[in-house]
Image (spheres, rainbow, N blue to C red):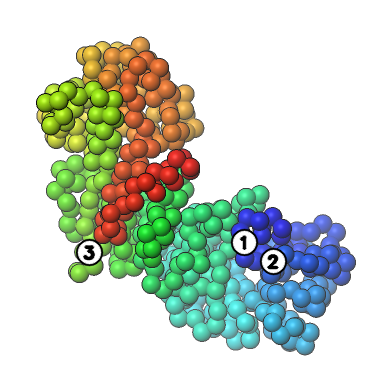
Amino acid sequence: MIEAKTQGADLVEIRLDYINDFQPRQDLEILFKDKPLPVIVVFRPKWDGGLYEGDENSRLNALLVALEFGADYIDIERKAASGFLRDANQVKPCDSKIIVSCNVDGATPSTEELEHLVAKMQNTGADIIKLVTDATDITDLVQQFKLLSHCQVPLVTYSRGERGLISQLLCPKFGGFLVYGTMKSNSIPGLPTLDSLIQAYKPEWINEETTVFGLISKPVGHSKGPLLHNPTFRHVGYNGVYVPMFVDDLKEFFRVYSSDFAGYSVGFPYKEAVTAFCDEIHPLAQSIGAVNTIIRRPKDGKLVGYNTDCEASITAIEDAIKQRGCTNEEASLTSPLEGKLFVLAGAGGAGRALAFGARSRGACIVVFDIDYERAKSLAHSVSGEARPFEEIVNFSPPQGAILANATPIGMHPNTDRIPVAAETLGVYQLVFDSVYTPRKTRLLKEAEAAGAIVVSGVEMFLRQAMGQFNLFTGQEAPEDFMREIILAKF
Ligand SMILES: O=C1C[C@@](O)(C(=O)O)C[C@@H](O)[C@@H]1O
């Protein structure tokens, strides 16, 4: 409890069924003496997914003892609720509350079934009700959002599993009573960590008016976007929240959430596929064929797709060359990429953005991709040349060329790989890596040692996020603030 308080929790749940050789009076007295935070007491029986296998009366008595000692909340299973509430009402201090809870395993029930269940739980006389389901798809959560908006008594509802995360993060928007999180030492899939609640999401700032943005990706847990966007919203006083959305089926996602969210970042593997769901696409994103940002246009609700990766990566490369003073006076009017050979590894979404950006600055592109057809198609669109991926290790670039890695090679956990022959690295004027974990990949370390200018994917990540911030909020992104976060957290 002390640790939870130190980490920033407002209240803590205690699971009595996890205490070895539990002696109710003795242990509860110790637990509740000078308790640093309000507590929710749970004594989950085996028949409802807990560890307790003993006699039911002893279990319920232990919960009554907890009330007597001043438990702030008791969580009691729906099936045991009526009897328990009768007894509890006689001993309970007036500011203690009873949470009647229900865990539904397996497929999410229909809206009618859930409403029926909630009505039954309400009828027990509960002060608060808690309903937990399993999410098989992010679209299942729409039911929870509806329940939260309509329920007559305080409600906590969420879905377990990676796909259920936003049911917890967004519940304050829909009127949920509290948000559960896990402590570092006790992570549970699908529940946000206390750390992420404190640093990124800050549920106490979220209300009915909060505008929701999401990162559509699969997987999505690796993204540092929430750590960057949420504090930046707060910094400028914008009432918004940015949450990871684990999406399996784009079509179903956009059908079900047809008006709920104000905009999205789009990540792996959907940057190309998502174009089919945009009502309009900005010409740059259209020519790239990849969208990493979507805005729901307020005046007509249409989804408009943009690409902020392209300018982010190309300006990061240009600025690094300019900062090194590698441009002469008359060349400073044009891009330092003009006339250069731009060697690109990877022709996916990020690769396409880089290729179109480099082309727009007058560079000549040579593309390598494990899918040769994909490389050819990209090369064709930027009047460049495609080469089979196997040739990249023998490729000898001309002096002063630019190398950009847009493959996942070198990304955590396979950090010891580089896409090209190490001996060629000194020939490049600049080496860019779109990988941002780790911040300095092996490719960048070796290129730097060989004398090349290096640009990390972190710089691209920052700049694409600044572009998204401008589109999301209509305000200028606070660059210094965002840079500070990047330095501290990446
Ligand atoms: O490539 C990236 C990174 C990202 O997918 C993320 O993981 O946060 C978010 C995207 O908008 C961006 O284009």
Q: CA distance from mark 3 to mark 1?
A: 37 Å
Q: Is residue 440 above or below residue 78?
A: above
Q: Which secondary structure, mark 2?
A: loop
Going from N to C along the chain, the mark reached first, 3 or 2, is: 2
**Position of the N terminus by quadrant:** bottom right
Relative vertical location of residue 427 with respect to residue 353 in this rendering, above or below:
above
Residue 312, horizontal then vertical, whole percent? 27, 40
Is residue 380 found left or right of 405 in the rendered image?
Answer: left
Disc 3 marks a residue whose amino acid type is Arg
Disc on res. 139:
none
**Circle 1 residue:** 9
State the residue in front, 171 or 144. 171
The answer to the question of whether label 2 and label 1 lie on touching residues, with beta carbons closer than 8 A, is yes
- The amino acid type, in three-letter code, at marker 2 is Leu
Q: Position of residue 259 (x, y in %)?
A: 30, 68
Q: Which residue is mark 3?
A: 297
* Residue at (31, 52) in percent of width and height: 477
Left or right: 377 as drawn, with respect to 423? left
**Does residue 81 appear in the picture of this structure?**
no
Helix, strand or loop under label 3? loop
Closer to us: 61 or 213: 213
- Does the image show residue 15? yes
Q: Which marked residue is nearer to the observer: mark 3 or mark 1? A: 1
Q: Which mark is residue 37?
A: 2
Q: Earlier in the sequence, mark 2 or mark 1?
A: 1
Q: Residue at x 22, y 50 (%)?
A: 306
Disc 1 marks a residue whose amino acid type is Ala
Q: In which image quadrant can residue 212 be found?
A: bottom left
Distance from disc 2 to disc 1, alpha carbons, whole Å, reads 8 Å
Measured Cα–Cα span from mark 3 to mark 2: 44 Å
